[in-house]
Amino acid sequence: MKLRCPICGKTYDEPVQRCECGEPVEFEAFKAEPYLGKTVWERFWEFWPVEPAMELSLGEGDTPLVKSKLGKELGVRLYLKNETVNPTWSFKDRGTFLAVSYAARAGYKAIGTVSTGNMAASVAAYAARAGLKAKILVSESTSEEKLKAVSVYGADVIRVRGDYGRLYFESLKLGEKLGIYFINSDNPFRVEGYKGIAFEIAEELTPDYVLIPTSSGGLFRGIAKGLIELKESGLIEELPTLVAVQAEGCSPICRAFKEGRERIERFENPKTVAKAIANPYPPSGNAVLKLLREFGWKCTSVSDEEILEAQGELAKEGLFVQPASATGIAALKKLMERGETEEGAKVVSILTGSGLKTLHTVQTRGIKEYPPEKLGEVTI
Ligand SMILES: *Cc1c(COP(=O)(O)O)cnc(C)c1O
Ligand SMILES: [Zn+2]
């Protein structure tokens, strides 16, 4: 299986982490038939660059696609891909599992990542599952609360002072030196694992739009690649319109796209409540921009106020997501207002991670107190 750079086109036979030109690499497109098995890993057996090590699975993937009542108000048929039910409560587990399948087979004794949130917990959990050591590099400012969700799995957490943005590349160098396989945000195996989201959606319906919260760009690239491979394999007829969604307070990809640039620029002073999508210099930014241009796709950014409102609306339907994961719904409202989405369109929004991880962003509401003798006064 060959790796290819989506920007300069150079190909590699070895599983390198990045192209010599500095951009991400990806596996060449798969062309295959689905296979009837139980899990998405088995059903789409021929679409993975490495054999999924099912003994290391924690049950990631095969998540519910829930029809949403919010669609009615907005005039579309809305479906929510609920990734909050993954083993560590975000879609990151899909990519981590496939990358760990590779690392364990390749004989690595340790894996690592650079993250402060969902990816750190995911890599720590799968390292524990596989009996590998985990080295998680976090920034100095990471809260104790977040570190608990990582260290509970027994990972070594390393706080790094200074420029956190440089850590992505520094970690790859360190990994090569020490024999640690770093599974960062757009690691090629990780991106492949995310294709499963596209496969599962296509098994259930043919969407017109897919809304994707976007930070590093790994998730967007994975869903796009999965859909493109299904089309090239003759399994779907049309590609939906993919929408990369960012927070206004950190939207380097949308900004570059709007300005018609081919390369992203660092977003200075990022500030948003949607911390999980606040990468100011996304390592797959240029690759996402290329996809947006090539397929005529969209990039939409939403404000913190719109994000929190959407988070509340999803909760009122019974789905508690973190702010980053509510951005798709906030973006859908904008697209409808601007007439960029037709009435009656089939729309899928990816609910990327659970709200229980960011409890500090929600207010307690509707709590009433009654002394026991007054409970009779409670009304329906
Ligand atoms: C990681 C993450 C994203 C964005 O994924 P990228 O691959 O970095 O673009 C979106 N939402 C949540 C909850 C995440 O953890
Ligand atoms: Zn390249």
Image (cartoon, rainbow, N blue to C red):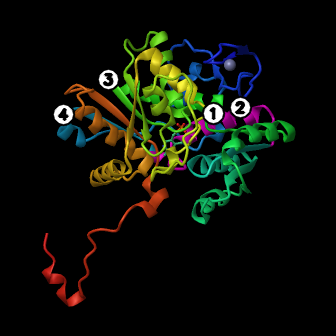
Q: Quick one: 174 or 380, which is closer to the camera?
A: 174
Q: Quadrant of residue 69?
A: top left
Question: Is residue 144 positioned above or below 95 on the image?
Answer: below
Element assignment for label 1? helix
Rendered residue at 30%/52% (across/down): 309
Vertical side of 367 occupied by 141: above or below: above
Badge 4 or badge 3: first in the primary sequence: 4
As drawn, the label of residue 102 is 2
At horizontal 70% and vertical 42% (from top left) the residue drawn is 166
The answer to whether mark 1 and mark 2 are in CB contact below 8 A is: yes
Q: Quick check: marks 3 and 1 in contact, CB under 8 Å?
A: no
Query: To which residue does mark 4 refer?
Result: 75
Q: Residue at x 53, y 28 (%)?
A: 222
Instruction: Name the quadrant containing residue 13.
Output: top right
Q: Is residue 177 left or right of residue 46?
A: right
Label 1 sits on residue: 98
